[in-house]
Structure formats: C-alpha cells, structure tokens
Image (cartoon, helix red, strand yellow):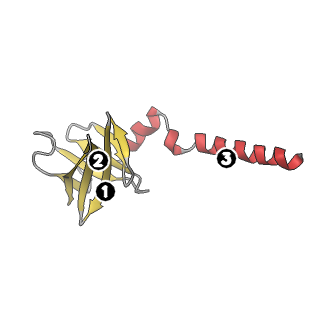
Amino acid sequence: MPSNTLYKLIALMVLFMTATSPGFANIKDEFERSQACSYFDAEFVSDVGVFDDIKVRFCISEDKTEVIYVLDNGTSWVVPFEREYRENGVLSLNTLEDGELIRYQKSKGVVKRKVLGRKR
C-alpha cells in the first residue's frame, strides 16, 4: 500500500510542475517576453507587402521557442517557434530556412508558405 501512495504523490508533483511551467505563463509574462526585442535590434526584416504597408521586424527568443513580432510603432507580440500552434482556426508553424523566417499556415486543408523576413 505505501508504494501506491508514493506513486500518487509523484504523479501529483509532476502535475504541479507541469501546471506551473512557462507554457502556462500569465499575460504579464507574455508582455515582458515580447518587450525583449527592439525594432532597431531585430535580426529579421520583413519582406515588402507581407503586412500591407506596416513595417515589422522579427526576433527569435534566446531559448529558440518563440518568434517576437515588433512593429515600427513599438507594438510587439509573441508566437511559438518551431512548433505548430492554432490561432483563429488556422494551424501555423514558424521556422528558419536558409536565413529566412518562414511561416507555414494550413487552412481548410491547404498549406501556404510565406517568407516573413530575411536575416539582416
């Protein structure tokens, strides 16, 4: 019987550690992560026409888990890097290919590839 209790205790500890991991960060944490990238220091520059007359640049977080979008007006946000995520029903994946930041999006069974930016 004591070993059964030990297994339950270990399972509870693993569940607690998972629930408190950065994946469940709050909005303040996400805001602070998005501020880690400056528009002028960003390593990727957007291609013309990607965002319809809006100048945007990109950084990849130090731990290589997030792409930070930064607009020239200072607005920024964070999306996952090198893992699929769903936003508004569209499946997306951001990755690097030959010095280019690429976004793959799948909507209604069709996958589209878009070059977001090129390395400076």
Q: Amino acid at mark 1?
A: Thr
Secondary element type, mark 3: helix
Confirm whether residue 119 shows in the render. Answer: yes
The CA span between labels 2 and 1 is: 20 Å
- Residue 49 drawn at (x, y percent): 10, 45
Whether 66 is drawn above or below 71: the answer is: below
Q: Which residue is mark 1?
A: 95
**Residue 56, numbered label:** none
Earlier residue among tags 3 and 1: 3
**Which label's residue is closer to the chain start, 2 or 1?**
2
Task: Please name the residue shown 50% across and 43% down the image.
Answer: 23
Q: Is residue 29 left or right of residue 105?
A: right
Q: Helix, strand or loop at disc 1? A: strand
Q: Which of 30/81 is in front?
A: 81
In the rendered image, which residue does mark 2 sit on? 38
Query: Which residue is drawn at the image coordinates 35% and 44% (left, top)?
Result: 79
Q: Is residue 35 visible?
A: no
Q: Residue 13 location, x and y as percent?
A: 70, 44
- Distance in Å between CA atoms under marks 3 and 1: 30 Å
Q: Amino acid at mark 3?
A: Val
> Residue at the bottom extreme?
98
**Which quarter of the figure has residue 9?**
top right
At horizontal 37% and vertical 44% (from top left) the residue drawn is: 85
Q: Quadrant for the C terminus, please.
A: bottom left
Residue 86 sits in quarter: top left
Residue at mark 2 to residue at mark 3: CA–CA distance: 36 Å
**Residue that label 3 marks:** 14
- Residue 109 percent coordinates (x, y): 26, 44
Closer to us: 104 or 34: 104
